Amino acid sequence: MTTSTQYQCGNCGWRGIEAEMHRIDDIHDRVSTGELMAAGECPSCGDLISVADEDVPDYTLQIVAKIMRKRGWLVTPAETEAAETGTLRVRIEADLERLRQVSQEPVLIRYGDQVQVEIRPKTDDDRVTVVHGSLGFVVANYQDDGVAIDVADGEGDIVQTMTATEF
């Protein structure tokens, strides 16, 4: 039976419905006892996939923890927090990947009161830029032969460049 539930690959970001997924032939070799059972195999990269995070209500973890406590399980806030953190990380990674795919120009994402992170289009390189208000910015340029770090002042002038050999 097919469903309209959306699934998402945590590896490549592929999204689709159950009918588009591949069957997991070697399920017992790929899912260990105690792990969350995968819904299928990604048709794009072959990784295991599960229900997309936004299809799982935000309160699901709290409900599951409450049921487990009633049945005698010891569920600590740290375990619940770790599960929620993992879920958020997967969702953010997928959203960032999608943003990189659809954007034509770099996009600034607020990270803190004064800090922003620049997200570059997928067609650009993998450089990372972190901007801090009027203090300036730092760019990490990842290249085949290593990394170069550019430090700029509040005016945008590069004041120092470091390479992987200088660290």
Image: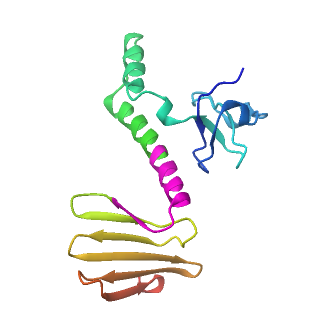
User: Of 94 and 68, which appears nearest the observer?
Assistant: 94
Q: Main secondary structure of the magenta part?
A: helix
Q: Is residue 92 left or right of residue 98?
A: left
User: Of 166 and 65, which appears nearest the observer?
Assistant: 65
The quarter of the picture where residue 65 lies is top left
The quarter of the picture where residue 24 lies is top right
Q: Position of residue 61 (x, y in %)?
A: 41, 26
Tell which residue pokes out farthest to the top in this image: 71
Q: Position of residue 159 (x, y in %)?
A: 30, 89
Q: Which quadrant is the N terminus positioned in?
A: top right
Residue 111 vertical placement versus 36 (above, below):
below
Residue 33 vertical placement versus 86 (above, below):
above
Tell which residue pokes out farthest to the front in this image: 104
Q: Is residue 11 left or right of residue 138?
A: right
Residue 73 vertical placement versus 148 (above, below):
above
Q: Residue at x 31, y 64 (%)?
A: 116
Q: Residue at x 20, y 74 (%)?
A: 134
The quarter of the picture where residue 118 lies is bottom left
Q: In the image, which residues are magenta? A: 91-109
Q: Position of residue 59 (x, y in %)?
A: 37, 25
Q: Position of residue 167 (x, y in %)?
A: 41, 81
Q: Residue at x 71, y 48 (%)?
A: 44
Tell which residue pokes out farthest to the right in this image: 25
